[in-house]
Image (cartoon, helix red, strand yellow):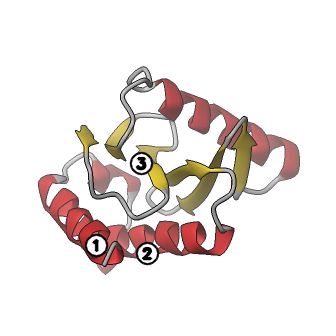
Amino acid sequence: MNIKVQFLPKDLKEIGIIKKDGTPIVKFSSLDNLEPTMLEKFISAISSFSEDLQGGTLKSLKLGKNKFFFEYLSDLELIIFCMTDEGIKEKKVQKTCQAIAEILKNYVGIEEKRPEIINNLNFNGLKEKLTIYFKMSNL
């Protein structure tokens, strides 16, 4: 579910939640030029490669003038990514990714942190909660 928005948190181009296998859950984007699911599959592949190579998760990645930040919800087998320009302060973007992770955890529920629960969720409620967060973060 790709949602074109005008109210992403300041300095962010794209925010997405994907399954570990690259399946998109929800994406908020101010961009028009990316092929749907191409970015998600790339993030999944590079994250798996990083785990295999380093034994740990990838926290950030610079590609050209873009920088990606990642937050992992391993119990749900989800990856949250935030894309921004290279010059944006890392702490601010990491804080946004962490806030999205907390909103998602609360939305799923403390007791239901299993990967299979994701398949049965209605993400419209999550979309609304994230939209409110994005609007508030720009005040």
Image x and y of residue 6, in percent? 26, 51
User: Of tags 1 and 2, which is closer to the observer?
Assistant: 1
Q: Is the C-beta separation of discs 1 and 2 under 8 Å?
A: yes
Element assignment for label 1 = helix
**Toward the viewer: 69 or 109?**
69
The disc label shown at residue 16, or none = 3
Image x and y of residue 54, in percent? 86, 50
Is residue 122 visible in the rendered image? The answer is no
Q: Amino acid at mark 3?
A: Gly
Residue sticking out furthest to the right: 54
- Residue at mark 2: 99
**Residue shown at the point (13%, 61%) measured from the top left:** 125
- Residue at mark 1: 133
Image check: 87 left or right of 42?
right
Q: Quadrant of the N terminus?
A: top left
**Residue shown at the point (42%, 23%) measured from the top left:** 33
Q: Quadrant of the C terminus?
A: bottom left
Q: Amino acid at mark 2?
A: Ala
